[in-house]
Image (spheres, rainbow, N blue to C red):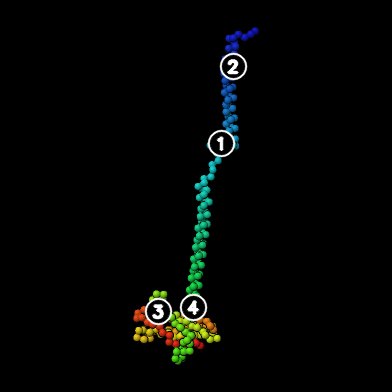
Amino acid sequence: MNPTPHSRNRRSARRGPAVSAALTLAASVTVAAALVSCGSDSDGPSSEGSRTSAPDASSFSEKTASPLKSKASEAAESARSSASEAEASASERADEYEASVSADTERANQAAEKALKDVTGRGNAMSDVSMTGKPRSETGGVLASVVTFTNRTDKTADFAVRVDFRNSSGKTVETRYIGTENLEPGKRAQRYAISHEPPEPKLSAHLVKAQRY
């Protein structure tokens, strides 16, 4: 027997809620699957909660720069220390050299005074010694003369001279003995005759004796 239109309508009405529920469930499953797919896709954006935070560039730079700055500071301090030590060493060597030169000069001057002690007259080497005054502007106001020794013999020789510093009246105020040792044949040597007297009154240097021995 064929169903009447009224009975078909009742069956359709009964199926309506079931179909709607099934469609709703299917749509939910599809949306969930899509969300899962998006979350697991390696090329797509991840959720905020699962995203890996990138390193803080400023923090990273600070952590790496700090040891480097420390190393640079240590290297600079080491360089300054080395330079200071080198400078101190050079200064010490200069002081030692100056002291040794002064000691040699003083010894030669003492030997010159001793050599001239018994020399009568002006000595045998006046023609081998000359003296030139230094401008006071170059000596800080000190009266100084350059004494030049020339060995014109064929043998190594020592030389001794006496220099008198006299005032304007011709009176000797100060006497200095200057010497040079082991001067080879044909060679020249220069020494300084320096007055220790005050700038005033003005004095003048005079070569009094010169002896080769």
Label 1 crowd (10 A; few <14 / some 14-19 / many >=20) = few
Marks 1 and 4, the one that precedes in the sequence: 1
Tell me which amino acid carries mark 4. Answer: Val
Which is closer to the viewer, label 3 or label 1?
3
| Residue with the mark numbered 3 | 143
Which residue is more in the foreground, 138 or 4?
138
Marks 3 and 2, the one that precedes in the sequence: 2
Residue at disc 2, secondary structure: helix
Residue 160 visible in rendering: no
Query: What residue is drawn where x is 57% and y is 17%?
Result: 16
Query: What residue is drawn where x is 40% and y is 77%?
Result: 135
| Residue with the mark numbered 4 | 101
Tell me which amino acid carries mark 1. Answer: Pro
Q: Position of residue 212 (x, y in %)?
A: 50, 87
Whether the residues at callouts 2 and 4 have beta carbons within 8 Å, the answer is: no
Q: Position of residue 57 (x, y in %)?
A: 52, 46
Whether the residues at callouts 3 and 2 have beta carbons within 8 Å, the answer is: no
Query: What residue is drawn where x is 55% and y is 39%?
Result: 51
Cα distance in 3D space between marks 4 and 3 = 21 Å
Residue 152 image label:
none
Q: Position of residue 106 (x, y in %)?
A: 47, 81
Tell me which amino acid carries mark 3. Answer: Leu
Q: Position of residue 62 (x, y in %)?
A: 50, 50
| Residue with the mark numbered 1 | 45
| Residue with the mark numbered 2 | 15
Q: As drawn, is 26 to the left or to the right of 161?
A: right
Tell me which amino acid carries mark 2. Answer: Arg
